[in-house]
């Protein structure tokens, strides 16, 4: 019955997703007693212009000056 | 005020989504007293390589051998 | 395989949720060809202080003056 | 640590998203004491055929007759 | 940067969640090259009356007769 | 039409949420041309045992030794 949603920067291959889905499902079976048949895993590929941390889009991160709050 | 998110395997037509949205909204009006104007329905089309059950991506499901956990 | 998330103001009874879940599942079976066994519906009860529209929390809506943008 | 998900009709530019992400992050820093480094903002661009209000897809909204529930 | 949301039937202990979070994070590091510092995992404990499969709430599942669609 | 979901560590007051909802709505009006009436903001209060970063639950963060990946 567990449902898992994974939002990740686009560009992961199908092989990478297959390995992640298998590992995450195994973790829920092993640590939460889940029935593997009922574990759902959904991936959401997020484009760099659709993700921001520290107030800056990832697509603009490389060009940005050092973040002030990281300076201490 | 209800918000409904529907994650579904990609490939549904606009007609199918229109019918689903109408039915879901009607269900919330009828059974929860919702104002139809305030019911939001969002569809998320999920690609087969972005969805896994039982630890296997849907895109690899057909080629896979029978699932062990279904054997009992 | 469809997954449905319903965020709704808290206070719905179990009977209401049961009726909604049945109707939503039926809509996906009828209009999208879903296998009912694989339809997941999750409800998220949202408290009035955790929901805002037009910039105002629902918990403060009743006490608020008429919304300017509704005046026309 | 706050995570913010913004589902919005597709068509917003990267500049618009950059401005929104900056403002939302600032709001969480100012009003919730969040560390800007730990604020995540994710945008989800929703197509008009994937969004419905009042039981009608946005992609079919313009062609629709006036909504009955708005008449009172 | 990955964000993982895990919706699971309520009742898991903190120890179980700790083990799941560690395993899921490790899977993203190993298979997707994620920086562990940037992996966010959020659990959402779902009550039995807030989860339905096959159109029936989990809270009413035990009392229900065998599901027709499972019979074939 | 924008829908905004904010997942934040539990403990924010109603006043804080009111201020955040107002600011976020204003940001969407100003930068995305949204109609304020159609902006939905939902808060999800997350308990410390339901949130992990770097593979460790927040509820266990204080007791944890320094994170290895932060050492460089």
Image (tube, coloured by chain):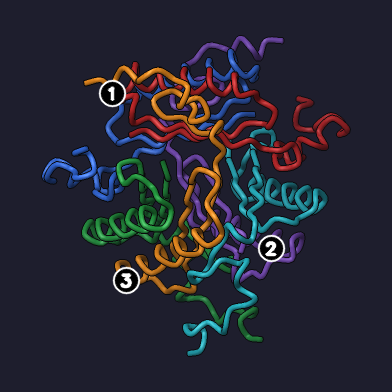
Chain colours: A purple, B green, C orange, D blue, E cyan, F red
Q: Is residue F43 left or right of residue E69?
A: right
> For residue D46, what is the image quadrant?
top left
In this view, B71 is above or below A18: below
Residue at (78%, 51%) from the top-left corner? E19
Q: Residue furthest bottom?
A: E72
Q: Are marks 2 and 3 on the same chain?
A: no
Q: Is residue A72 left or right of residue C17?
A: right
How busy is the neighbourhood of tag 2: few (under 14 within 10 Å), some, or many (20 plus)?
Answer: many
Label 1: which secondary element: helix
Residue at (50%, 48%) from the top-left corner? A12
Residue B48 x %, y %: 42, 62
Q: Which residue is tagged 3?
A: C30
Residue B25 x %, y %: 33, 53
| Residue nearest the observer in this picture, A27 or E63 | E63
- The answer, for residue C56, to whether it is visible in the render is yes
Q: Which residue is tagged 2?
A: A26
| Residue nearest the observer in this picture, F51 or F15 | F15
Labels 1, 3: front one: 1
Q: Which residue is tagged 1?
A: C70
How busy is the neighbourhood of tag 3: few (under 14 within 10 Å), some, or many (20 plus)?
Answer: some
- The answer, for residue D15, to whether it is visible in the render is no
Q: CA distance from mark 2 to mark 3?
A: 33 Å
Residue at (28%, 23%) from the top-left corner? C70
Label 2: which secondary element: helix
User: Chain ID for label 3?
Assistant: C
User: Chain ID for label 2?
Assistant: A
């Amino acid at each position: 019955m567990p449902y898992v949603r994974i939002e990740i920067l686009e560009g992961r291959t199908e092989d990478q997703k297959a390995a992640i889905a298998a590992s995450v499902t195994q973790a829920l079976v092993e640590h939460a007693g889940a029935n593997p048949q009922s574990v759902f895993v959904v991936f959401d590929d997020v484009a760099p212009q659709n993700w921001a941390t520290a107030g800056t889009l990832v697509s603009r991160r490389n060009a940005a000056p050092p973040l002030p709050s990281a300076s201490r």
